[in-house]
Image (spheres, helix red, strand yellow):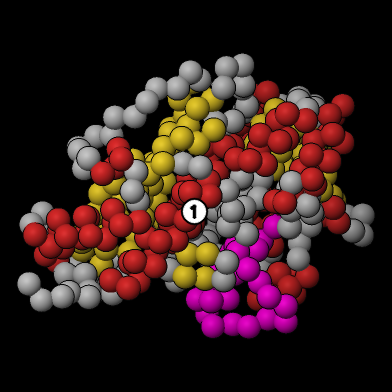
Amino acid sequence: MREVERILLAHGSGGELSRRLVEEEVLRYFDDPVLGRLEDAARVPAFPGRPALTTDAFVVRPLFFPGGDIGKLAVYGTVNDLAMAGARPRYLSLAWVLEEGLELAVLRRVLASAARAAKAAGVAVVAGDTKVVERGKADGLYLISAGVGEVPPGRDLGPARLRSGDRILVSGPVGDHGMAVLSRREGMEFEGEVVSDCAPLAGLVEEILAAGEVHCLRDPTRGGLVAALKEVAAAAGMASEVTEAAIPVRPAVRAACSILGLDPLHLANEGKLVAWVAPQDAAAVLAAMRRHPLGREAAQIGEVLEGEPGRVVLTTPWGGRRRLELLVGEDLPRIC
C-alpha cells in the first residue's frame, strides 16, 4: 500500500487504514499498556478515594498558538477540571475527530504534544477513539476528552462551602490564553510577547490545600475571571467584591485589550486558578501559591460578602464601583 501522508475518509472506516492510524500513529506516542490492549473499555486499577469524572471538547482555532496547541490544551484542560474538584488526576480518554485532508505531520505533532503533556501531568491515557469527517467540517481536528481522578478521603471543595469574609485569590495574571490565541488567529503582533498560560494545575492545588482552609477552586477558562466569580457567587448564594487594581494583568495583554476594545477579565485562561479561602488562612495560602512556579504572581483580589446571590462588584482604581456581568455574546469563539 502506498504511503499516505494525509487523512482520508478511509481512515475512519474501521478497515486497514484505521488499523494503521491507531497502531502506527497513536500508539507510537501513547504507550500505556492499558491503551495498548485496544479493548472497547479500559480496565484500570481502583484507588481508595472517591472518583471524580470530567469531560470536555476542544475546538481551538488555530491548532497551534504561542505557548501551546490543541493537544496540550486538551490534556491540561481536563486535568485542571479534575484538580478544581480537589481530585488527583489519574486517567484520560482522548477521542480524535479528524478532517479529511489533514496532514499526518500535523496530527503527529499534536499527538506528540498531548503525550508530553500527559507525562508532565502524571496521567495515563488509557482509552480513545478516532473518527474522520469530510473536508471542511472540523478545522483540521477536534479533540474530546474525559478524565478520571481521585478525591482523597475528607477533601471537600465547592461553592456550598463559601462563607462571608472568605478571601478570593488568583494564581497569576489573567487573559494570557485568550489573547495568545487571538493574536495568532488574526496575525497580530503586539509590543511584548503574549503567550498562552496553558499548564497543569494539580501540583499547585496540592500545595495550597496543604497550606490552609480552601473552600472552593475554579479555573477561569471560557468567560474568564468574571465568569468564574459570577458562577461561584451564584452557586453559593453569596455576593463578592473584587478590586481592579489588585487583579494581575500582563502589560502586553492590557495594551492589546485597550487597542481591541476587550476586557482582560473576560478573556480565557488555561493555567490559572481562583481560590476562595478562609480569611485566617489567606496569607498562608497566598504564600504557598507564590512559592510554586505556577503561582509566583498570585494576588488576593477580593472577598465574599452577604448579599444578592451572584452579585459581583468591581472597585475601580478611581474609587468607582460597577457590577460585573457575563457577556451576552462571545468575544473570542473557539479559544479552547
Q: Is residue 135 left or right of residue 225?
A: left
The answer to whether residue 141 shows anywhere in this view is yes
Q: Which residue is drawn at 52% across and 71% down?
A: 65
- Image: magenta residue range: 174-196
Place residue 232 in its image quadrant: top right
Total marks drawn?
A: 1
Residue denoted by label 1: 117
Seen from the viewer's position, the closer of residues 246 and 73 is: 73
User: In the rendered structure, does residue 182 fall within the stretch colored magenta?
Assistant: yes
Q: Is residue 160 left or right of residue 290?
A: left
Position in image of residue 312 (x %, y %): 73, 43
Q: In this view, does 296 lie to the left or right of 104?
A: right
Position in image of residue 18 (x %, y %): 15, 58
Position in image of residue 194 (x %, y %): 66, 72
Residue projecting furthest to the right: 319
The amino acid pointed to by label 1 is Ala
Seen from the viewer's position, the closer of residues 140 and 245 is: 140
Q: Residue at x 22, y 55 (%)?
A: 22
| Vertical arrangement, residue 44 with respect to residue 33, above or below | above
Seen from the viewer's position, the closer of residues 327 and 270 is: 270
| Vertical arrangement, residue 188 with respect to residue 309, above or below | below
| Vertical arrangement, residue 194 with respect to residue 235, above or below | below
